[in-house]
Image (cartoon, rainbow, N blue to C red):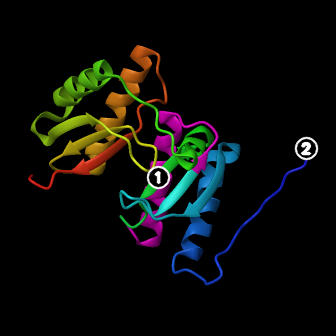
Amino acid sequence: MIGKLRILFPEKSIEKEDIILELARELRRELGGELVGVESYSGPDGSNVRIIVRDKTWEVVDKVIEAIWRFEKKKGIEGTILPEINDLKELLLVREGATMHISNEIILMLRNKLKEKLGDNLVGVESYSGSDGSNVRIIVKKKTWETIDKILEVIWQLEREKGIEGTILPEIEVSAFA
């Protein structure tokens, strides 16, 4: 099998260049061939690193988040890497500007399940068409890693229950009125 490695650099060096290269190395060790790429990024939600994987499962997302957490801790830069994790299919949808629509029935089920899990921290759940391909906006009073983990767990369970794995792409926002 012939492989190819390509690293593209911007014309001018960026501040996070070495961090991104080191992070890519750590993620490659953790994910192996599941990792497609790591790139600097400026997402509409504040994300600053895009991680591209072959198949975005909840297990892969958990591995990425845990690897980033360990990497940040080791480097003393906790909370500075804000990843957007995409698989190749999502990346194509984002680049083509397409967004998968989620039915009102699924939105209502998601809202009810999130209310059970998050209680008063949940402000709202709505259909959404984000520039990054997200198709559901989840609004919370307080956004912590624990909250994000609970949201992803609920989404994963609902997708499996309904046989729609990988279709709910959330945008998680903090309420301006919380």
Task: Tell me what residue is drawn at x 47 percent, y 71 percent.
Answer: 75
Q: Secondary structure at mark 1?
A: strand
Residue occupied by mark 2? 1
Furthest-right residue in view? 1
At label 1, the amino acid type is Glu
Please state the horizontal and vertical placement of residue 30, each as a whole percent of the image: 60, 49
Position of residue 71 relative to residue 10, above or below, is: above
Q: Position of residue 98 (x, y in %)?
A: 51, 40
Q: Main secondary structure of the magenta part?
A: helix
Q: Position of residue 60 (x, y in %)?
A: 53, 39
CB atoms of marks 1 and 2 within 8 Å: no
- Looking at the image, the residue that sits furthest to the top is 162
| Mark 2, secondary structure of its residue | loop
- What amino acid type is highlighted by mark number 2? Met
Residue 11: x and y, percent? Answer: 65, 81
Residue at point 32%, 29% (across, down): 154
Residue tagged by mark 1? 84
* Residue range (magenta): 52-78
